[in-house]
Amino acid sequence: MTSTSGIVSDLAALRSHLRASDPRYPDLLRVKPWVALRDILFDWLVVFGAVAAVVWGGWGWVLLAVLVIGNRQRALGNVLHDAGHGNLWRNRVGNDTVAQLLVAPLLFASLTRYRVTHFQHHARLGDAASDPDFLHHTRLPERAWLTTYARFVLSWRSWLGSLGGHLFDPAVHAASKSYIVVWWASLLGLLWWFAGRDFAVTFSVVWLVARATAFHIITTFREMCDHFGLQPGGVFSFTRDMHCHGFWRVVIHPRNNGYHLTHHLLPAVPYYHLPAAHEVLQQTALYRDRSSICTAYFSGTGSVTRSWAQGVQ
């Protein structure tokens, strides 16, 4: 069970050190709303482009469209995550307006509910009884990570959450669910009006298929990367950073989402500053001595799959 005092002490020690010794720290906290808006626009355009390829290029494009859209759903989920922390805009009204108009309902999410559960994750990190993102694990041989991953992928509760977001969450108020439904009806109506019936229908079908498949598969792996196989007790002991580059980073961790330890230590840093924040942290003895960092996904001594097995043996 994780001690809340252990989490607080980890954060207080690090932030005190950064405020006192690193002049770059204030710059890491500065938000650039135009960056988030640009990225949201990019994701919308990619999704529309993928749907257009299916509508006007034929159903031979559907597999690629599902993969691309699932990846962009993951990227938009990262933007929602930043909105939950107020990192899109320091002005709360601006932050929440952007999220509630362009991101949250598209992902079947209630921003209010997301904030509640995500704050609980930060505050009760690693507590099996009260951390909503805690993944239970059992002992496994080093090469058996795929079996455990498949178990999480095939979890009915997890899959339903990926497919329907907060629509199936009994803790979400009916008003919030109604807003999501009305928002989607409005979106499909606009698509039908401007792009035609086939585009609107294809958009909804491919979006749902991507949520149920590619998005779910990516998100499950991403969630395991964050904390799985590590020891509860504090932020350092139970969170890792994925300092990776290349194809798999783009697929699994768009928008710098792999810097999860960095995020837990500095949650007010927006996603586009996380690589710089990671570099700043690497200059501190506290981070160098206590951090868990993986430099690959599937192979090598620094791979996260190897870390999963080593951590639970």
Image: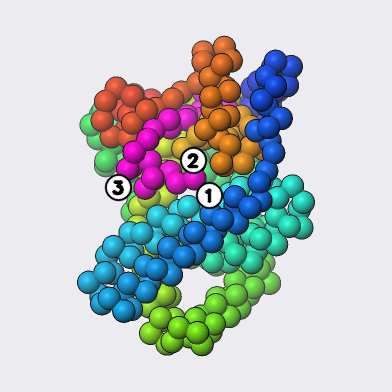
Q: Are marks 2 and 1 in contact (CB under 8 Å)?
A: yes
Task: Name which of mark 2 and mark 1 comes first in the sequence.
Answer: 1
> Is any part of residue 139 visible from this angle?
no
Q: In which quarter of the image is residue 146?
A: top left
Q: How far apart are marks 1 and 3 (CA)?
A: 23 Å
> Is any part of residue 28 visible from this angle?
yes
- The segment highlighted magenta reads 235-255
Amino acid, disc 1? Asn
Q: In this rendering, is residue 56 above or below 146?
A: below
- The residue indicated by pointer 1 is 78
Q: How far apart are marks 2 and 1 (CA)?
A: 9 Å
Left or right: 2 in relation to 223: right
Q: In this rendering, is residue 205 above or below 195?
A: above
Q: In which quarter of the image is residue 283?
A: top right
Q: What element carries label 2?
A: helix
- The residue indicated by pointer 2 is 256
